[in-house]
Amino acid sequence: MFYSIPVNEKTAAYILSWRYPSPYDLYNDMGGEESLKEFLENPYFAVINEVDEIIGFYCIGYSAQVLNGYLFGVYEEGYLDIGLGMQPELIGKGYGASFLAFIFDSLEKEYKRVPLRLTVATFNQRAIHLYEKFGFKKRMMFDDMITTFQTMVKDASL
C-alpha cells in the first residue's frame, strides 16, 4: 500500500539527490536551487510505501510538461499533464505497475474522469511499454537539444 504527501523541502532534497544510470541520467537533477524551488512551489507529491520510504514522486500540470514541447504545439488544452519518477534502485524490479496504479487512483479521487497526458523520452521504452499497458496512446513527438520526447494520452475513462 502506498500513500502520498505534498513534497516538502526534505523530501524534495532527497528526490533531487537521486542518480539514474545512463541513458536515464537525463532525469538527474542539474538545477540545484532552481529545481528545489520548482518542487516546493508546484504540485509535487512524494509516494511513500508501507514502511515509510519514499519510492517515487509525481507532479501535475505545467510542471509535468517539457518546455520545448510548446514550440511544437504538443500541449493542447483539455488534458491533465502528469509527470513521475521512481527511486532509481527500484526501477526494473516490478514495482512500476503498482506505482502507476496508485498515482492514477489518486488522480481519479481528486480530478474524477479527466483525460491524462504525459511526456516521456522516446528511449525510455520500459516506461512507454508500461504506459501502454495502462491505456496510453502515442500522440506527438518533438525534439529538444538533448533527446526526442513523445506525448502519450489516455481518455477520461481511467
Image (tube, rainbow, N blue to C red):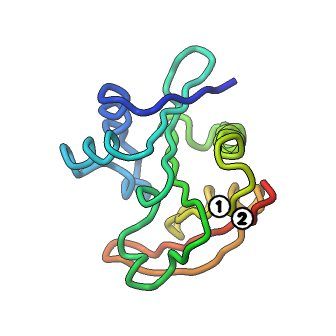
Residue 26 in which image quadrant: bottom left
Q: Quadrant of the N terminus?
A: top right
Q: Residue at x 18, y 43 (%)?
A: 33
Within 10 angstroms of label 2, few (less than 14), some, or many (20 or more) residues? many
**Residue that label 1 marks:** 116
**Residue that label 2 marks:** 154
Q: Position of residue 107 (x, y in %)?
A: 65, 45
Q: Position of residue 109 (x, y in %)?
A: 70, 40
Judge left or right: residue 143 versus residue 32.
right
- Name which of mark 1 and mark 2 comes first in the sequence: 1
Judge left or right: residue 39 versus residue 137.
left
Tell whether label 2 touches label 1 (CB within 8 Å).
Answer: yes
In the rendered image, is residue 94 in sight?
no
Against 77, is 62 above or below?
above
Q: Residue at x 60, y 23 (%)?
A: 49
Q: Residue furthest right?
A: 157
